Image: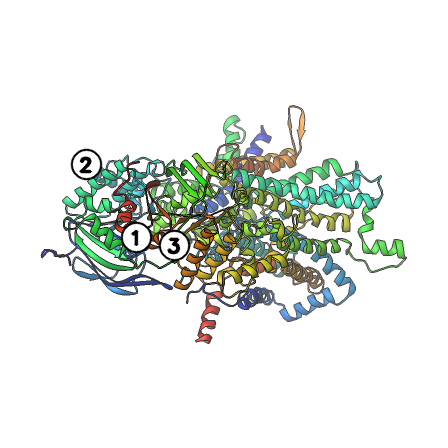
Amino acid sequence: MGPRGELPAWVDLGLIPLLNLTVALLVAGLVVVIIGENPLEAMWIMLNGAVGSLKGWGYLLYYATNFVFTGLAVAVAFHAGLFNIGGEGQAYMAGVGAAAVGLGLEFLPWPIVIPLAILASMAVGAFWAWIPGILQAKRGSHIVITTIMFNFIAASLVGYLINYWFRPVGKMAVESREITGAYIMSFREVAREFFGVRVASSPLNFSVFLAIIAAFAVWYLLWRTKLGYEIRAFGANPSAAVYAGIKPDRIIIITMAISGALAGLMAVNEILGVQHRLVLGFVGGAGFVGIAVALMGRSHPVGIVLAALLFGLLYQGGSELSFAKPGINRDMIVVIQGLVILFMGALEYAFRPALAMLFFKAED
Amino acid sequence: MDLYAEIFASTIRMSVPLVLAALAGLWSERSGIVDIGLEGKMLAAAFIAASASAVYGSAWIGLFFAILVSVGLALVHGYASINQRGNQVVSGVAINMLAAGLAVVLGNTWFKEGGRTPSLPPAGRFMPLDIPGVSALADVPVLGFLAKVFLSHSIITYLAIILVVLTAWALSRTRFGLRLRAVGENPHAVDTAGISVAGLRYRAVIIAGVLCGLAGAFISTSLSSSFVRDMTAGGGFMALAALIFANWRPWRALFACLLFGFLQASGNYLQGVSVGGVQIPVQFINMLPYVLTVVLLAGFIGKSIPPKASGIPYTKDR
Amino acid sequence: MTSQSSAIPAIELIGIDKRFGSVHANKDVNLLIGQGSIHGIIGENGAGKSTLMSILFGFYHADKGEIRVKGQPVRIKSSSDAISLGIGMVHQHFMLVDPFTVLENVVLGAEGGVLIGPALDKARAELTRLAHDYELDVDPDAIVGELPVGLQQRVEILKALFRGAETLILDEPTGVLTPDEADHLFRILGTLRDQGKTVILITHKLREIMAITDHVSVMRRGEMVAEFKTKNTSVEQLADAMVGRHVLLQVEKGKASPGEVILDVRNLTWKDRKGVPRVDNVSLQVRKGEIVGIAGVSGNGQSELLDVISGIAKPTSGQVIFEGKDIGVLGDPAHVRAEGLAHVPEDRQHRGLIKEFDASETMILGWHHDEALGRGFRLDRAKVIARAKSEMETFDVRPPDPLLKSAKFSGGNQQKIILAREMLSNPDLLIVGQPTRGVDIGAIEFIHKRIIALRDQGKAILLVSVELDEIRSLSDRILVMFTGKIMGERGPEADERELGLLMAGVAKDAA
């Protein structure tokens, strides 16, 4: 039996990913040992820091919200066989859309401004992914390269826009002024404003519901609509899709736009939900975390929500850890991300031949 | 005049890591292995070079370890891409993250400066070569200018130029170059000619590792005097852009890198350029390499054709 | 069987056996190739010719058997072993590096030193000599990718000769050539033989065998079934051996009662990217209530014809008139389906189904826009599953589990899934490619009955198959395709040999 022979579904979908994740975490533990700390203790501090208090949960969910959006963005593209590395840039550009609408339509009441700002985030994010989509579909430019380039273009472009257009005259900090209607997104502000209750400081805001809706919407799109069917068919087998009358160009362009819109929602959480103003570099790598989340969540919304929660835990726990143990830097999370991507993505099948051998030996 | 000399000299300095990384990408991709991980390898090398140099007090030792680590990462990429037939882009992304994270985590542990490495003394750095007689030229009109532009660099800069020549020569004139170019275009042709596809590709990724090691060491021990987080600042991707711009050819890659290096240098020195009375913000200069690459990829100016087999794992059946 | 003179044979294959999973590609094959001869190996597609030669060239390894070169037993572990034993191969798909020059391609793998300069010089001189000796002229500095295929093939031959090949294997060398180029190739091969080289020619074209070989071996279903001296045999005898005495599968079939013309293909031509006409001025009609079979060795334009009719490819010229409408101009499978044309594709794995999808999802592929499956943009999972369930029962798909992954069904059941999907869409015209390829006997019978039942409902069917007995047992009319052209039309009672000759391009009806 060859190494790529048939294994039962629970091995392929359950055991192998679990094994890969375990190996990734073991290697991460090894790094902790190398820097002279106790990985079990570190793990305990992280867990405690993330889920041991209400505040910890608030941060965990806030981080997870970002990762659900960027993870879904990567996953939708994966389903069409496309690798969108541009979530970072798409989210960054989307922040401009949110801020432009939020600030530009300030004179309107928040029930109008906020939904419009959310739509603007999605639209601008979609636009920033739509161009690479068009270039791939019509001109054959490789989506991986163009989306990488678009990340850098966005980085410069948004920097310019904040500096030259959003920054109030005379202000030193490179950021826009406050989006006044945005306070309504924050749980803390709403609790104080409408209920007179003071709650612990937390960045958690209404975007978390948006993340749940987005996860459901992606599931619905992919598995309950004709368009989703076409996206999956094209991604799984392009020549069968062409046989079925599915148009590749159309699928590439639409999928990229949807992917970009999802990445754009990350700006809602960050700009409207937390910062309430457009700030430099607010995406902070969340677009790349999305790749790890999508790979770990096997591109399924449920898996992505779980993976996003895990990464939320790592991020929040990681900051607590770096307070408690100055020896372990917060960037340990980035190491774990890298290991997850390596073992769950590029080395996805590394353990499969060995498992298959074990499995078939047991069967004999 | 002095400002121009500064800008041109700086252009060359800025181009060196780009040139080395672009050559690394060239070797890898012409063998059929897509390398998104140039950035990560460079970053890891920059960190290790600065660390080892700080500890051992020698830039050369720093360079040695930088190359060692960069090759190590290259081999991880090679294993994932060649043996495991994994997704090469995913593997590259993973390596970038691993490098970015590990550099800061280890740096923090080793030097307790929040991921930064200690400032290196001149002995721990690749300083501009002290070429006899050059200082005497400083005030000579044209020669002084040229000396300042071309003779004010460290050994790695000159090595980089030699490596361009060497790469161009090896690719076009040697057996290894011929086979490497072939394996990136049609691995089946190589296999049926009785040559190992995997062997060629491993050699290519190792070369890419060595070159990224040089590039990284240059950044932290020549261009700068310590490692700081994210110090490669997207240089690996700009090198990738230059490589595409150069249509995967060594000499053209050199010129593309010089162009991009010039854009970086002039951005740094001028903080914006005025064209016909209109101020062009520095951000536009910074994004220009990427915009140019996208336009090129879309086939609006010329055509860039990647090696046909790049990114596709090799399997015997067709 | 070959009465070879006392000379030691160039190549001996003894008891070669090779399996790929469940496919027994070579069964205990023995073959003797005489020195300085042109030896043809003929057989239908899938007869095992290419596998056998790939084993000889070290690309695959035989499970059993022995190879002898010039009487010496040898082990060929890789292509480089074969090359060093003086064996060269010209593959069906050329193994050339397109952006390289002719010289670079010739030298690749035989550089002789670290620098390629000396090798290039040597190759240039050698090429001049070979050009002179064998009519193998080609500009050494030309970029290979820009050369016409005939010249690319010459480069492949030059590569082998430059490496000192004594025995040259050519796999279907004329498939890509014009008749003129083919004639030139045969002259070259003749010269090679006269200079003492040994040539093995794999082909399915009888004309070529008769024209240039000295000996011919016939393969069928993995076995070596006959061997002749070419001058002692005839086209008819070879056709018999190649096709075999098939037991005609008994399919109960009443007489057809053809109605009006529903599909009218007029002067249809389709050229590939290189401008080679793969479908060449084809005209045919299919009426309601009849099965029209297209026979032919695969690779003679049948696949492309199906693609154009089903809208996957757009015709280069000519028309595809379906129910009075030119559907060729649409070039869109979705539109063509909506007009009432169903299509069972030849390539089940790559086109017909999506392995990752469960059966219910594969069963709506191409028909997913049906409003009955969900209004507007929606796709109602319950309805999709319900449809799959009922269709699976109708077609006796086993297991009848709509949630099982498509990849997990056996070949026969996968094919039933596809047939159920297409046939139960109630089409006016069904086009079917290779309906029973890789399908077990039980399923074959079922599928055949279904196709005939559909005809008896008054539907039109266009059938493409490389299985001649399938064509003969199902079709009401038989068209034979060869190199993109229709060679002639026969009734189902047509003699096998006659069809075999048409398929081999030997005879052509005066059109």
Kindly identify the amino acid type of the residue bearing the numbered disc 3: Asp
Cα–Cα gap, marks 2 and 1: 36 Å
Secondary structure, mark 1, is loop
Instruction: Give the chain letter at badge 2.
Output: C
Label 1: few (<14), some or many (≥20) within 10 Å?
many
- Does A188 sit left or right of A329 as displayed? right
Residue B317: numbered disc:
3
Q: How is the image coloured?
A: rainbow
Of all chains, the one bearing label 3 is B
Mark number, residue C132: 2
The answer to whether mark 3 and mark 2 are in CB contact below 8 A is no
The kind of residue tagged 2 is: His
Q: Which mark is residue B193?
A: none
Residue C107: percent from left, percent from top: 29, 44
Query: In which quadrant will I find the C terminus of chain C?
Result: top left
What is the spatial separation of the Cα atoms under label 1 and label 3, in whole angstroms? Answer: 21 Å
C234 or C142, which lies in front? Answer: C234
Q: Earlier in the sequence, mark 2 or mark 1?
A: 1
Q: Which residue is mark 1?
A: C44
Chain for disc number 1: C
> In percent of the image, x 83 and y 45: which residue is there?
A110
Q: Depth-wise, is mark 3 or mark 2 nearer the camera? A: 3
Q: Secondary structure at mark 2?
A: helix
